[in-house]
Amino acid sequence: MSSSPQTEDFDDAELVILTDELGRQLPCYIERELELDGKIYLLLLPENAPIEIFAWDEDDEVTELVSVEDEEEIDRIFADANAVLSEQNLTLKRTAFTLSASGELPPLDPTEVVTIELDEEDDQLEPEEFQILARFYNLEQEYAICTPVDPLLFFGKADANGTIALLSEEEAEQLQPRLEDMLLDEI
């Protein structure tokens, strides 16, 4: 793939920059490059650790973690979350498509792994495992800062100019099974 303003070479691994509609960027390594129907598709791995913030929701006898997705709530708790992560030499970043943390993650501690069903309405999605990196309170609400145990991967595509973009939801639904089959064939 030719070098463009969106790509850079780091230690023989190509780094591309994904940008969201708000102009936030997410540097990703190209894990695999696949050609399908004359188009180039990419399997992308974020350069830094993806971060998910969950709020502890205690309802009578059930305690569960609920993903914090509201931008205003993230804005309100961001400084506290960053301060707690900085105690582990991690820096929280507002990146495109996911929060991320730069720095070295602590070793995986099985006692700090939780299994979460991210979408209760979609029976096809498997529960995901997250490692709790830190906990903190903001306005009497307890939060958990987590990173997925399994790598967070994105499917993207390159246009004729070398610009990288994520697949649209429609494209992902149509192409993801074929791309996954191709990836499995390579292993």
Image (tube, grey):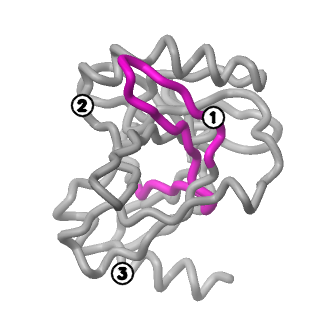
8 horizontally vs 137: left or right: right
Is 151 a magenta residue?
A: yes
Q: Position of residue 184 (x, y in %)?
A: 57, 84
- Total numbered labels: 3
The crowd level at tag 2 (other Cα within 10 Å; few <14, some 14-19, many 20+) is few
Q: Position of residue 99 (x, y in %)?
A: 47, 32
Element type at mark 3: helix
Which residue appears farthest toward the front when viewing the image?
Answer: 60
Q: Amino acid at mark 2?
A: Asp
**CA gap, disc 1 and disc 2:** 20 Å
Element type at mark 2: loop
Q: In the rendered image, which residue does mark 1 sit on?
A: 134
Which SS does the magenta portion mostly show?
strand
The crowd level at tag 3 (other Cα within 10 Å; few <14, some 14-19, many 20+) is few
Q: In the rendered image, which residue does mark 2 sit on?
A: 70
The boundaries of the magenta stretch are: 132-155
